[in-house]
Image (cartoon, rainbow, N blue to C red):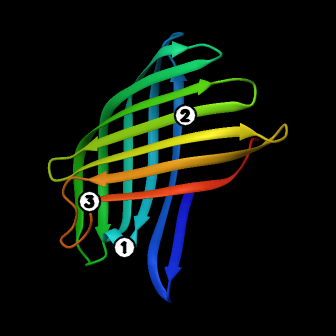
Amino acid sequence: VRGDYQESSGKKTREYANAAWQGDWTISDANYALGIVEYERDVLAGIDHRATTSLGLGWRAIDNEAVKLSLEAGPAYRHEWFVAGLEDSTLAGRGALNSSWQMNDKVKLSHDMELVAQDKNNTLRSITALQAKLTGRISSQFSYDLRYQDNPLFGKENTDTITRVGLVYDF
């Protein structure tokens, strides 16, 4: 779950929400099947609501204590409701790369990237984060989030970035 809201000089400059769930089912030590359900809202980009579902296969290319790298691919279905009142549904392809490097017992670097390719618009999301443990369950985190659309709605930017500094609670 992610959300951003920002006002500057009394004007709304960011309103974004994202909630996603991914279930993985082990096929073998290196392979798994997956199912994803995701919801997005990005009013300033012209997207009132966006729902994406996907089924696919994943491969754990590297999976040890220090380094993890997995690749995922599969078909997706996306339904979008635009602020202007229009709707669109499309079949798409989804690919993802997830990686992490546990540098030591307190510091971890991670990078997650996802591409959803549609006939009218491709979207790319990339999140790079550096986490440092403060206590057993609490870490500080510095992250850089990039969202890109190659064909944004008229008058909208194709790239949005945000840099965050925060605290993370590990359940």
- Specify which label sits upstream in the sequence, 3 or 2: 2
- Toward the viewer: 122 or 138? 138
Extreme-bottom residue of the structure: 10
Q: Is residue 45 left or right of residue 133?
A: left
**Residue found 45% across the figure and 46% down from its top:** 37
| Among the 4 quarters of the image, the one containing residue 139 | top right
Q: Give yes or no for contact between labels 1 and 2 (Cβ–Cβ under 8 Å).
A: no
Residue 96 percent coordinates (x, y): 38, 33
Figure check: 40 above or below 133: below
The C terminus is located in which quarter? Answer: top right
The kind of residue tagged 1 is Leu
Residue 164 percent coordinates (x, y): 57, 56
Residue 123 percent coordinates (x, y): 29, 49
Residue 167 percent coordinates (x, y): 71, 52
Disc 3 target residue: 158
Disc 2 target residue: 110
The kind of residue tagged 2 is Ser
Q: Is residue 100 left or right of residue 113?
A: right
**Residue found 25% across the figure and 69% down from its top:** 156
Disc 3 residue crowd, few under 14, some 14–19, many 20+, Cα 10 Å: some
Figure check: 156 above or below 165: below
Disc 1 target residue: 44
State the CA–CA distance, disc 3 to disc 2.
24 Å
Q: Give yes or no for contact between labels 1 and 3 (Cβ–Cβ under 8 Å).
A: no
